[in-house]
Image (tube, rainbow, N blue to C red):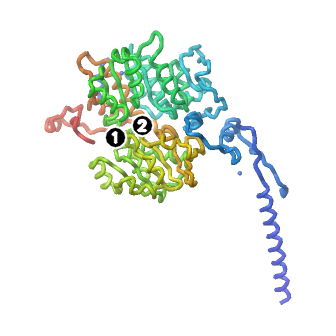
Amino acid sequence: MTDSNGDGKLEVKQASKEVKESENVAEKYSAMTVKNTDMNVGELSAAFTAVPTLKSVKKQIQFANQEDKQEFSKFPTKAGRRSLSRSISQSSTDSYSSAASYTDSSDDESSPREKNQANTKGNSDFCVKNIKQAEFGRREIEIAEQDMSALMALRKRAQGEKPLAGAKIVGCTHITAQTAVLVETLVALGAQCRWTACNIYSTQNEVAAALAESGVAVFAWKGESEDDFWWCIDRCVNTEGWQANMILDDGGDLTHWVYKKYPNVFKKTQGIVEESVTGVHRLYQLSKAGKLCVPAMNVNDSVTKQKFDNLYCCRESILDGLKRTTDVMFGGKQVVVCGYGEVGKGCCMALKALGAIVCITEIDPICALQGCMDGFRVVKLNEVIRSMDMVITCTGNKNVVSREQLDRMKNGCIVCNMGHSNTEIDVASLRTPELTWERVRSQVDHVIWPDGKRVILLAEGRLLNLSCSTVPSFVLSITATTQALALIELYNAPEGRYKQDVYLLPKKMDEYVASLHLPNFDAHLTELSDEQAKYMGLNKNGPFKPNYYRY
């Protein structure tokens, strides 16, 4: 009994000691604060035939390098947090590259338009954020080249013939490492190029610098204002002693600008290549009105664009963009995807695979039926808007998500767009005095209602994946190769082959692009025997499907 009582007293003393130590530990950690620091392609037809002490401690964070230190300082402390007005100011000019840019966290906030920069050859016909970032950009381009072997193969096969010699191409696309591989391929095939960005957020500054260093006149930087955007387009088109004869566009803004501001240049253009649904829609409008005076190639509706870029690219990049910006977990989340075209299909596949509960909206009964057969409930947005955790648009239309629907969303709902244009979400209606905008991180804003409800808006309603993340190089190789071949075809086509209208790519071209990418998978095509080809009424070398075939 005595020993037992002794043991009991010992246990009490030890327990008491542990409580005191626990209180000391709690006191120590509650006293800790973080000290603020000063951070701050000859014959194209032949090619087509080939098939984280007891005293209160202020602990200073140690950074591995100055860039990390500068980046940390971008995120406001509780005391420094501020609301943003609804003018395009901070939100539109944030220059941090969410695509892991090395030097976009520079504290140099001056506009590139105010700088006098020159590359190592003394050329200053460009405007980028910082030409000194060129070395980093070159490394990113080299990485992209490794996974864009088909485009590189096209460059190797055709650069001896220089099929684009004499071509003066003005381009308006996303300026990423993958686009840079395309631009440098066009240059290798004999073209002169001037380039600008089709999106104010998607430019990788270091890649733009690398292009400028290589001699390409590029006018773009991440975080352009609306005025900067049109200024850059104008600088590409309007330059002394140089006139474009080919246009490569993504979205139709460049084509629209040339048509409106430089009609003489537009009339003398030999062809337009357009890759987005928005831009193609604008071309068909011009054609229908009898105002399209040059032939145009619709890349967006090519099989290689629709079935690979739109589907597989979005299937991977939608998750990347959402994770980078919101750190969201998808399992169990209620998600509505507006539009079940190829982009919508890719998004739904990815979200469903990670456990999200996905429903879709559609105007087309065929696409809606496809959604039903794929296991998705087809709804009207108004029916489900109050219960959704995420709303994703991918229609190419305007005001798909209205202010009324934004008002009815639940607290914490994530709203983003996977279509090319920034018109799908009615962001303009949110620029009102009663709503407060709060920058959370690059391309992420809290829009706060008077009752305290917060909606998380990504990239201000612009294209999520290219604004907030990166996209797979291999898939973009397919689209880029198609664009290059379309430019070669239009530029080298004999007079009369193409009239003043919008054309789809020849089926043979789609098959050729696909064949260039098969070696990456060690894929071996089966060949038709003469008897089989005759039985099917096909040429042994293709095309293997009629133009009306839907893959």
Mark 1 → mark 2, Cα distance in angstroms = 17 Å
**Residue placed farthest to the bottom in the image?**
1
Question: Which quadrant holds residue 342?
Answer: top left
Residue type beneath disc 1: Lys
Quadrant housing the N terminus? bottom right
The residue lying at 42 percent from left, 42 percent from top is: 424
Question: Which quadrant holds residue 243?
Answer: top left
**Residue placed farthest to the top in the image?**
241
Residue type beneath disc 2: His
Q: Secondary structure at mark 1?
A: helix
The residue lying at 31 percent from left, 47 percent from top is: 363
* Image location (x, y in percent) of residue 400: 40, 45
**Pointer 2 local density, CA inside 10 Å: few below 14, some 14–19, many at least 20:** many
Question: Which quadrant holds residue 547?
Answer: top left
* Image location (x, y in percent) of residue 218: 51, 22
Q: Is residue 150 something that shows in the picture?
A: no
**The disc label shown at residue 420, or none:** 2
Task: Give 119 or 343, whichever is nearer the viewer.
Answer: 343
Pointer 1: what residue? 307
The residue lying at 21 percent from left, 33 percent from top is: 540
Q: Secondary structure at mark 2?
A: loop
- Indicate whether 551 appears above or below 283: below
The mark that comes first in sequence, 1 or 2, is 1
**The disc label shown at residue 79, or none:** none
* Image location (x, y in percent) of residue 423: 43, 39
